[in-house]
Amino acid sequence: LGGRYDSVYFKTHDRLTKRRVRAATDTAFTPQAGLVWQPGRATSLYASYAKSFLPIASGATAAGTFLDPEKGEQLETGVKQEFFGGKASATLAAYWITKRNVSTPDLANPLFRVQTGEQKSSGLELDLAGTPLPGWDVIVAGAYNDAYLSKDNRIAIGSFLPGAPEWSGSAWSKYTLPSGDAKGLGFGAGVFSASKRQTALPNSVWLPSYTRLDAALYYATGAWMLQLNVKNVTDERIYDLTGTTMMPQSPRRWLVSAAYKF
């Protein structure tokens, strides 16, 4: 069980008249709770609930008042199961997220905002991890996310939220030689994929789906670790959403690193 109390004070000054135009204080108590139950040593069932609070520092209504804080709720539940004496595990989770007080343009006064918006997101996540052989680690994950606009005064209800892929998944495998003259030498490879995403509200342009391949080669000896990472091995052209801007992501890139533990 947990809780947090916030108090945020805003004030606006008119620099021409050198006077305070308006001031406001937003307060909120946001609780959170979680529960884990283990019916057996290899099985864990869990559930969690939390509220969120986000003050809005910019924008105002036509009446000259500050916008109310955005508020959210999240509910998550899932199960984690271990197999083969802990050598493998699987986690399945379901979640429901609601964000309220989302601001939208005032249709009667386009320079101002009103808060009639609501956004919802729900989905499933599955993670699998295991060690099939000594030195060999495998991680696979997949997710389904239904993120949409549930209330608004001007945009069609059910519109997809920007930057949220409906499907995404990843897989990573690495192997480290556990013995012999080359003990500590290892390599890995992984793939990440995401379905198409919308760029804005109202929906207009889709960012295409993509698949990115990464790889790594490393050597650990004593306290030293030398590593070479290659991101986007196939040099795919990938676009993502940064705020309201469509940004190209890095092409193929190489990263060489050295670490010493002491």
Image (cartoon, rainbow, N blue to C red):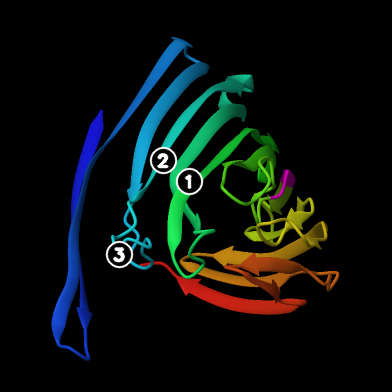
Decide if residue 191 is in sight here.
no
Q: Quadrant of the C terminus?
A: bottom left
Q: Which mark is residue 181?
A: none
Number of other residues with Cα within 10 Å of mark 2, as a class: few under 14, some 14 to 19, many 20 or more: some
Residue at the spot of label 3: 64
Of 31 and 26, nearer the camera is 26
Q: Please, what secondary structure does the residue beneath circle 3 have? A: loop
Give the quadrant of residue 29: top left
Q: Main secondary structure of the magenta part?
A: strand
Please name the residue shown 72% across and 70% down the image: 231
Please name the residue shown 66% across and 41% down the image: 157
Residue 30 in the magenta stretch? The answer is: no
Give the quadrant of residue 18: bottom left
Of 260 and 41, nearer the camera is 41
Residue at the spot of label 1: 116
How far is disc 3 from disc 1 in space, using C-alphas? Answer: 17 Å
Q: Which mark is residue 72?
A: 2
How far is disc 1 from disc 2 in space, using C-alphas? Answer: 14 Å
How far is disc 3 from disc 2 in space, using C-alphas? Answer: 25 Å
The amino acid on which the numbered mark 1 sits, given as a three-letter code, is Thr
Residue interval drawn in magenta: 165-169
Q: Position of residue 78 (x, y in %)?
A: 54, 23
Number of other residues with Cα within 10 Å of mark 1, as a class: few under 14, some 14 to 19, many 20 or more: some
The amino acid on which the numbered mark 2 sits, given as a three-letter code, is Gly
Earlier-in-chain disc, 3 versus 2: 3
Q: Is residue 109 left or right of residue 125?
A: left
Q: Position of residue 107 (x, y in %)?
A: 54, 58
The amino acid on which the numbered mark 3 sits, given as a three-letter code, is Gly
Instruction: Report the number of discs.
Output: 3
Q: Position of residue 203 (x, y in %)?
A: 73, 56
Earlier-in-chain disc, 3 versus 1: 3
